[in-house]
């Protein structure tokens, strides 16, 4: 008796709700119809799968799972972290490569890279020895040029040349008498002393050159 009363109350409440909100109830029934249609379509699709199709889908799922496991290595994780940390730099590098490719420069660089091994293979022992000797000589010249005394002397000479080359007050023409008179100037005497010191050092190095060979 109680159950019958409960059902009657529920029916009355439903009828009251329909009377009070007919539009909402209509939309609800429409949605229920769509849901039932989707469920029917899924059921039809499921029933259409034969055993072979189910096996293929299962195999595809296993393959994807294995691929995911293969990608989830320490190296790939570190690579992804590096890409994330250097995203802006990688973007600029890719843009540069694209520009080089469009301009044809990338192909030229690749061709040049192919020529380098050929050039290296064409060098015989004598040529390599000559290049090594030239490199050693250049190294010695660089060492000499970087010597503090040499640097100071070159700076002095260059500064003097700059002072003597003033376009607003060019040097005057000097004859023999003028030259003799100029030797009394302390600055000229200091300059001559510097030139004589260079001449003496040059002669000394010239004598040492045959012994070095």
Image: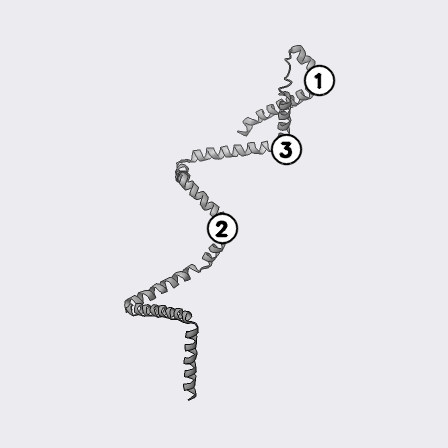
Per the rendering, the mark at residue 148 is: 3
Q: Are dots 1 and 3 in contact, CB under 8 Å?
A: no
The residue located at (30%, 69%) in the rendering is 44
Q: How many other residues sit within 10 Å of disc 1, few (<14), some (14-19) or many (≥20)?
A: few
> Is label 1 or label 2 in front?
2
Q: How many other residues sit within 10 Å of disc 3, few (<14), some (14-19) or many (≥20)?
A: few
* Disc with the residue nearer the chain's start (1 vs 3): 3
The relative height of residue 6 versus residue 201 in the rendered view (above or below) is below
The residue located at (33%, 65%) in the rendering is 57
Per the rendering, the mark at residue 87 is: 2
SS for callout 3 = helix
Give residue 58's position: percent from left, percent from top: 34, 66
* Disc with the residue nearer the chain's start (1 vs 2): 2
State the residue in front, 121 or 162. 162
Estimate the spatial distance between the alpha carbons at disc 1 and disc 2, rounded to whole Å: 70 Å
State the residue in front, 124 or 97. 97
């Amino acid at each position: 008796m109680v159950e019958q009363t409960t059902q009657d109350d529920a029916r009355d409440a439903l009828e009251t709700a329909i009377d009070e909100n007919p539009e909402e109830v209509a939309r609800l029934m429409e949605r229920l119809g769509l849901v039932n249609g989707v469920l029917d379509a899924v059921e039809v699709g499921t029933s259409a799968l034969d055993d072979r199709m189910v096996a293929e889908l299962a195999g595809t799922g296993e393959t994807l799972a294995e691929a995911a496991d293969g990608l989830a290595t320490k190296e790939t994780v570190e690579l992804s972290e590096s890409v994330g940390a250097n995203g802006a730099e990688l973007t600029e590098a890719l843009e540069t490569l694209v520009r080089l490719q469009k301009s044809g420069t990338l192909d030229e660089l690749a061709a040049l890279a192919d020529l380098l091994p050929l050039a290296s293979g064409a060098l015989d022992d004598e040529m390599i020895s000559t290049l090594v000797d030239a490199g050693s000589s250049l190294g010695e010249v660089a060492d000499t040029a970087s010597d503090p005394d040499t640097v100071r002397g070159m700076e002095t000479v260059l500064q003097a040349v700059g002072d003597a080359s003033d376009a607003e007050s060019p040097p005057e023409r000097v004859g023999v008498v003028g030259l003799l008179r100029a030797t009394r100037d302390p600055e000229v005497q200091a300059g001559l002393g510097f030139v004589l010191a260079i001449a003496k050092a040059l002669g000394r190095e010239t004598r040492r050159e045959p012994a070095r060979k």
